[in-house]
Amino acid sequence: MASEFPKDTIGQPPAGGGMIGRIKRLLMSPKTEWAAIDAEPMTTQGILTAWVAPLAAIGPIAHLIQGQVFPMSIFGVTWRPPLVGSVVTAIITWALIIAMTYVWALIIDALAPSFGGTKNSISALKVAAFSATAGWIGAVLGILPMLGIIGALLGLYNIYLFWIGGPMLMKVPQDKAVGYVIVSIVVGIIANILAGIVALAIAGAMFAMTPGAGVLGTPGGGSITVGGTTIDAGKLDAAAASIKESTDKMQASLTANGGAGAKAVDPTALQNLIPASLSGWNRTSIESSGGGAMGVNISDATAQFAAGDQSFHLKISDTGAMGSLAGLVNVTSSKQTATGYEKTALQDGNMVTEKWDNESKQGTYSVLVGKRFLVEAEGSAPSIDVLKGAVGSVNLGSLASLAS
């Protein structure tokens, strides 16, 4: 196994004061500290596990705490995000931050020769990881809503850190440094926007499987109630074990595949499972996509069906290695509204979510297969049975077999 940072007697990077000392020096005397970072031998695994992973967790944890402690209030209505969905979203966000740090390092490395610099994957990862320090530290202020904007402003110091360290570590000549920094930052911003879209898509699916207003009730009888959703508190240890198992699997996949991680199923294979037609409904379009980085790989296929003025989409999604996190969501709920209902339950080992409104004739029906694949029909139809039939038209056995 590759070695991590060289360690001193207290198990920290050697430059005095451990991680805290390095953070202080990087923020207060960046030119000197970048020179030390440049000279220090490091590995990809060491940078990601000893620096990126712990600091990248600050923002998601702060946001999680903020959402639970300071619920959102609009026009007198208070809303607190569902706890289970918030935890899953925090984990996904943390994983994506790590992945995008790695992706940005690839960008930094690839652009260097175009500006007279030298390709060096370790140096590029150093730049991506250490230049993000100010933003990660400032994210702790996100716990308090009124200080969140200050944390965001502190994140702008990342640009200054990159401005100094990027050209230095990538050996870009001074006369080309400005262009290199600007292009790297612009491309990095675009990559992060794309990552944000992926995060919203995954988080949306997770929240869809965790209905309820998100107001914590009082634990009783070994359970916790979250907006009408009951969670078995006795399974918290199992959930923690599941997080560890997911992390271990991702790390093993990264090691085995040279950093590429476990691949999601080919989008074409998902598309082939969507029927060409449904009784009384015409398929008007179909599309598929996929991609990812550093173990965070996803793919999906979506078809649109229409009949008269009604339409719905049928979508199959594979969250790849991140799909194991869905195992943390194990809830049951049932809610009646004035015009419809919402419910979530386990059926044949799969999580099934159902939502229908009789007035608008709109709803959602989804099945989480093998804690990995989400099959969803959503839109307008004469009844929920149409959406159930659409999901049922997908061979779930064949879908599950794609994971092997």
Image (tube, rainbow, N blue to C red):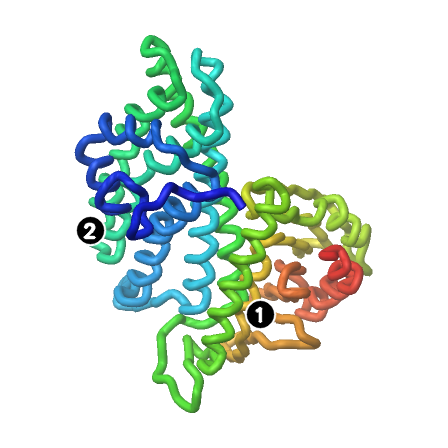
| Percent x, y of residue 258 | 60, 40
The quadrant in which the C terminus is found is bottom right
Characterize the local packing of mark 1: few (<14), some (14-19) or many (20 or more) Cα atoms within 10 angstroms.
Answer: many
Q: Nearer the viewer, residue 320 or 174?
A: 174
Residue 72 relative to residue 126: left or right: left
Q: In this picture, is 120 found above or below 240?
A: above
Residue at the image point whose x is 63% and y is 49% from the top:
262
Question: How far apart are the alpha carbons under marks 1 and 2?
Answer: 37 Å
Three-letter amino acid code of the residue under disc 2? Leu
Residue at the image point whose x is 26% and y is 57% from the top:
143
Residue at the image point whose x is 39% and y is 42% from the top:
5
Q: In this picture, is 305 found above or below 173?
A: below
Three-letter amino acid code of the residue under disc 1? Lys
Label 1 or label 2, whichever comes before in sequence order: 2
Q: Disc 2 designates what residue?
A: 147
Residue 340, visible in the rendered structure: no
| Percent x, y of residue 385 | 71, 70
Disc on res. 355: 1
| Percent x, y of residue 227 | 41, 76
